[in-house]
Image (cartoon, rainbow, N blue to C red):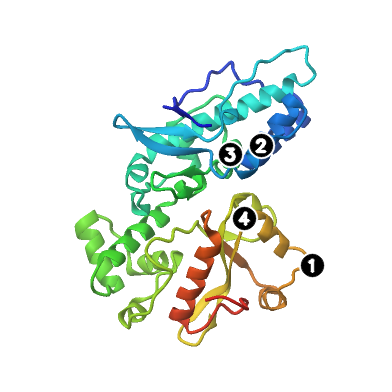
Amino acid sequence: MTITILLSHHLKKNSSPLHGSMIAKITLSKILKMPLEKYVRYIERKFNGSEDNQGKHLSFYAKVITKNGDLRLEIADQRLLKRYPINETNRNAVIVKMINTRNELSEHIVGGILKFQKKFWESGKEADIKPLTFKRFLSLFPCHWLDRSRLSRLVSVLPLQTQDGKIVSLRELFITRKRFFATVIKKMIDESDEALTDKDIQTILRKRYDIHLSVRVICNCRKLLSIPDYKSRLVGTRYYGKDIRFSDYVKLSKGQYNRIHSEGGVYELSSANRIQYANHRSDVLYIGSSKNIRKRLLSYSGSNGKNACLKRLTNGSDIYVRYCLTEDYVQLEKQLLKHFKVTYGELPKTNKLGG
C-alpha cells in the first residue's frame, strides 16, 4: 500500500519530545539509524506485540513521481509517515515519541532534498546533483529537533526510488564541490566523440560552465570516479560504463561503517596503493555484491574473513570502499567484473570468479 503526499518542510517545534536522559538519547540514536525493514518491524512489535513480515522487503522510503507538474512522493509504507497517539501514562510513551520524531524528521529531510535537488529528480542525471553539505542543508531547511548527527543517521537509511526505477541513497545527494566537478567532467567525457586531454577539459570547463580548475584538480576529479587518463581512453579501453553511479569513497576504519548503506547493491574495494594488472595499473582489489552492503563489509573487519588473498593484500594498508545501490545487484556485479576484465586484462586480484 502506498500513499501520495507533497511534503512540507517544517516540523512543529512542540511535536518532538526528546529532552531527557542519556539513555533516551542513545535509544533515539539507535531508532534513527535502523534500516527501513528493521524499523517497521520494530514499530509493529511495539504496537501489536509481533513483527509484520511486510517490512522485510522494504527497499526504499518512497518513490519520486511527477503529478500535475509537481514532484511528489509515494511513501512505500504508511508506518514510515504515521503520527502515533501518545498516552503519557503508558510506559511506552517515550518510545512512541521517538517513533513520531523519526517519522517527522524523515518527512522534513526528504522534503528538503526533493526541493533542493529538483533538477536531479526530474532528469535522473548525476551531473544535475548540486553541491550540498549537512551544514548548508540545516541552514536552508532548519528544524528545531534536527542536528548534524541526526541528519547523518537518517540520510543513510532513507533511500528513494527515482522516476526511472533506480534506488538512490540520500547520502549520495550530499556531495562536495569536488564530487560535483567530477560528475561534470564525466558528463563531458561521456558525451565527447573524441578523447579529451585534461587540458581540453580545463578549456571546456572555463568556456562552457565558467568553472576554473587547474589541470591537477581535474586529474584528481577523474580519479575520484575511476575515469582512465587520456592515453587509456584514446586506445579504446573501457571503464565501468556511463550509467553506473557510485557513492563517494569511504575509508574502512572504526567509526566509518555507519556511512555505508545497509541495502542491496555492488561495492568496490580499493587500496591506497596501485597494483599492476595485465594492461594497466589500478587501485581496485575486489568487486562484490550483497543484499546488505554494510553487513557484508563488516564481515571483512573480523579475523574470520574467508578471502585470504584480500587479507594478505590489505594487511597494514588503508582500504576504501564505494558502492552502488541496486535491486539487481547480482547482474550488475557480473557486468562490472566483465568491464574491469576488458579494461585491465584480468579480474581484480582478490576476485576468484566472474567476468
Q: Nearer the viewer, mark 1 or mark 2?
A: 2
Disc 2 or 4, which lies upstream in sequence?
2
Disc 3 or 2, which lies upstream in sequence?
2
Q: Is residue 231 left or right of residue 316?
A: left
Circle 2 SS class: helix
Residue that badge 3 annotates: 154
Residue that badge 1 annotates: 303
**Gap between marks 3 and 4 measured at Cα:** 19 Å
Circle 1 SS class: loop
Disc 1 or 3, which lies upstream in sequence?
3
Residue that badge 2 annotates: 39
Disc 3 or 4, which lies upstream in sequence?
3
Residue that badge 4 annotates: 291
Q: Is residue 342 left or right of residue 90?
A: left
Q: Nearer the viewer, mark 1 or mark 4?
A: 4
Residue type at mark 2 is: Tyr
When the figure is inspected, residue 194 is found, relative to residue 73, above or below; the finding is: below
**Gap between marks 1 and 4 measured at Cα:** 22 Å
Q: Is residue 113 left or right of residue 31?
A: left
